Each structure stands twice: as structure tokens, then as C-alpha cells.
Amino acid sequence: MRLALIGDIHLFQTRVHPSRLVGKRLLGHTNLMINRRFRFNHRVLGPMIDRVAAIKPDSVLLSGDVTTTSLEDEFHDVATYLEPLSQKVPTVIVPGNHDKYTFRSARKNRMGTHMDGLLPESFPHVRPLHKHWRLLCLDSAQPQLLWSRGALGYEQMQAVTAFIETLDKHDALVVLCHYPAKMPAGIPHSWGHALAEAKPLHEMLTECPARIVFVHGHIHKPWQWDPANGGKPGNGDNSGLMYLNAGAPCLTSNRYPFGQGFWEVDLPGDPWGPLELIHHVPEEAHGQGGHPSSDTMVQPNTDDSSHTPQSGHVSHRQLDLRWVIHRVL
Ligand SMILES: [Fe+2]
Ligand SMILES: [Fe+2]
């Protein structure tokens, strides 16, 4: 079974009515205008959706942070981008901290309203994937005044514990959660940016006899590692647990000038069989390389409006990309 894993898209709106810029969103929007908007290039999003569709996944998983400050238009634009995919392929998303950015957006369930059918109605959510494999979706996002700390909460943690205790070595599980339960050695992390139940969750999954692939986002660097393999790559076939970080597909850097791409995960029929992992990374097809211009430099698209979200200002047809694949396992 083939999964496509898409990380932190962080779609945003630069033009926001002043009445919406109160509380935490004012801080977030200020950060967006002076920092974040220059590092995210959402022109890669359309080609990436096309590429995901081209690998013909059986299911698409999004690890959250699809928006920046949980505005209705941000959710609407993401849903529109995903539509060609989500109409054909089962697609599931879990919330990130930016998708419950304000207390009001969380209280009004803005994500559930605008991403109808993609967000599970309740958490934890379990669904079958393939033979012995199941998907466990967690809601780790909570609105916070200043921090970006995540939490599952007492009730969800109790339900997860009860579910994990039912698993044995014949079971296999993909956990989809915005926050990682464990970070590789050497990666800096802070209290205010971590998951409250990270330690007990990681210990619970480590002790579970089933094979577990924990997929997450939140940290904007794609990686894959096996805690029982000294923090190095490994597919968890000894320890039973591996972590896969989706990264941020639209975040540009010297290493990823056209964003961090997405993961393809081919699950074996046998829970302990070889798991194939491919990282799809975009490069410019005909160019000199280097950083593409940021979203703010892009003019409204007039000749391909069918592919452009109504409230968005980005066009994905102006980039000509080719895809490089990195086989990790
Ligand atoms: Fe996040
Ligand atoms: Fe994020």
C-alpha cells in the first residue's frame, strides 16, 4: 500500500482585514510580514499536488500546520489546492498548532468546517489501511497565548493507551500526529515547542510489540530515524518503532531551494516486511538553480484561474519543476 505524506504547508494571506489582527494573530501576522513570507514559496504547492497524484497513492496523510494563523481563507485555499487529490484519494489531516492558532478559531472548529471530510470528527481516530496496518490519528494541537506547545490531553491519552494495549506483534500501525513524540539526538528543542505527553507517548510506543511508523510534522526539516539504531536511519524492523518527519513542502533553503518535497511510504503486506521510503524533492527543470522569488513577488494568475484558490494570490503554473527521488530504505 502506498501512502503520500505531506507536511507543514503553512499557507497564508498577506492582506488581512485589520479587525482580524488582534491577540496572537497580530504577533503571527507581524512575524509573517517580516520573516515567514520570505521563506515560504507556495508556488511549489500546485506542482507538488500534481506529483503526489502522479505516484498514485492509496491514501494521503497531512500532518497539520496547513495554515499560518487559522484564517477562513487560508483553510479554504488549502482545501481548494487539495481538491484534485482529495476527491480521488482518501485524504486525512490532523491539526497543527497553526491550525488552532487562536482560541476563537479552535472554539469555532474552523478547520473542521472548512476541511470537511478530511479532518476526522473525533480523536483519537483509528481506521484500517492495509492488511495488518491501521492508521491512528491524534489531535496534538491546542491554542496557546504565547507558546506553541502541544498536548493530547488526559482523555485522548487514556484512549490511546487503551488502544495501544490491544496491539500485538502481528499488528502494524501508522501514527499521524503533528508533534513528534521523540526527537533525534542533536536537534534543539524547547519546552514551549514540544508535546506535553511526548515522553510517556514515546515510551508507550517503544514498549508496544507492534510495528509502528510515527509520522509527524512541526519541525520544518524532513528526516527519518530509528530510536533503536542510535538515532540513525532505520526502518524499525528491529525495534518496531521509527519516526518520519514530513518537513515543510514550501519552505525554501539552500538545501531545498524549491521546498522540502514530500514522502512516499510503501507499506509491506507483512507487518515486519521491508518498508520502502522515498523522499520526492523538487528542482527547477530549466534554470540556474538558487532561490525562487517568494510568494509576494507573484502577481495574480489570470490565465489558469481554475487551479488558483479564489482568495489566494499564488499561481503554481509559473514554475517548471522536475522531481528528484531519494530512496532512504
Ligand atoms: Fe507546528
Ligand atoms: Fe509548522
Image (cartoon, helix red, strand yellow):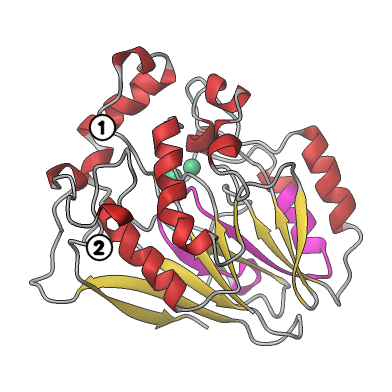
Q: Which residues are magenta?
A: 201-229
Question: Nearer the N terminus, badge 1 or badge 2?
Answer: 1
Q: Which residue is at the front of the view, 167 or 88?
A: 88
Indicate the secondary structure of the residue bearing disc 1: loop
Ligand 2 found in image quarter: top left
Q: Where's residue 196, x and y in %?
A: 65, 37
| Visible residue check, residue 241 | yes
- Does residue 130 show up magenta in the picture? no
Q: Where's residue 306, x and y in %?
A: 31, 55
For label 1, the residue is 14
Which of the 4 quarters of the picture holds residue 136?
bottom right
Q: Which residue is at the front of the view, 236 or 61?
A: 61
Name the residue type under label 2. Phe
For label 2, the residue is 258
* Residue at x-position 70% and y-position 38%: 152
Left-right relation of 292 to 174: left
* Residue at x-position 15% and y-position 59%: 291
Left-right relation of 197 to 299: right
Q: Which residue is at the front of the view, 271 or 119?
A: 119
* Residue at x-position 19% and y-position 64%: 319
Q: Nearer the viewer, mark 1 or mark 2?
A: 1
Indicate the secondary structure of the residue bearing disc 2: loop
